[in-house]
Amino acid sequence: MEKWTQEQYEQVLMSKKQQAHDAMELYILVNAKELQDECEPGCKNLTAACKAMLNQMLEGDGFEVEPKIRTKIAGKLTVRYYCDNLDPSRRKYSEVNQ
């Protein structure tokens, strides 16, 4: 079985954010290990999951648990994505917080 790509994880995240938006939820919390287990049960692909999560962060989103890529803590990465405004004009988190 081929591992998921970062882009595949990003599509899942976008779908989760849209579902929360449609349900009028203010935010969702996403944990890297839980996301990986949901998408690829039994697989070890945290790097792709974490990179996708970081790339999907927009201005105003925040960390519940800070990222530590390439360590055992990577699975603990947890992001709060605000879903009330999914306007594509919002800046990426990385553009605002460098």
Image (cartoon, grey):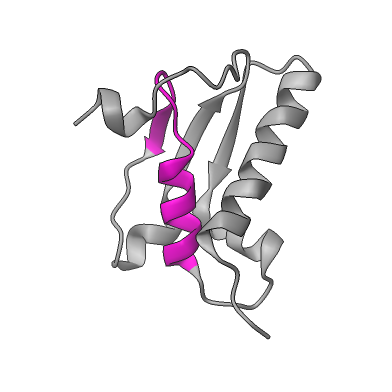
Residue 40 picture location, percent across and down = 67, 69
Q: Residue furthest left?
A: 98
Residue positioned 77% across, 30% down in the render: 19
Q: Residue furthest front?
A: 89
The N terminus sits in image quarter:
bottom right
From the viewer's perspective, tell me whether residue 43 is left or right of residue 90: right
Q: Residue furthest right?
A: 23
* Residue 52 lies in the magenta-colored region: yes
Residue 96 image-quadrant placement = top left
Seen in the picture, residue 57 relative to 44 is either above or below; the reply is above
Seen in the picture, residue 17 relative to 91 is either above or below; the reply is below
* Residue 79 lies in the magenta-colored region: no
Disc tally is: 0
Q: Is residue 34 visible?
A: no
Residue 37 picture location, percent across and down = 64, 64
Residue 13 picture location, percent across and down = 62, 43
Seen in the picture, residue 80 relative to 76 is either above or below; the reply is above
Residue positioned 58% across, 16% down in the render: 87
Q: Is residue 67 visible?
A: yes
Which stretch did the figure color magenta? 46-64
Q: Nearer the viewer, residue 86 or 38?
A: 86
Residue 26 picture location, percent across and down = 63, 16
Residue positioned 45% across, 60% down in the render: 75
Residue positioned 19% across, 31% down in the render: 98
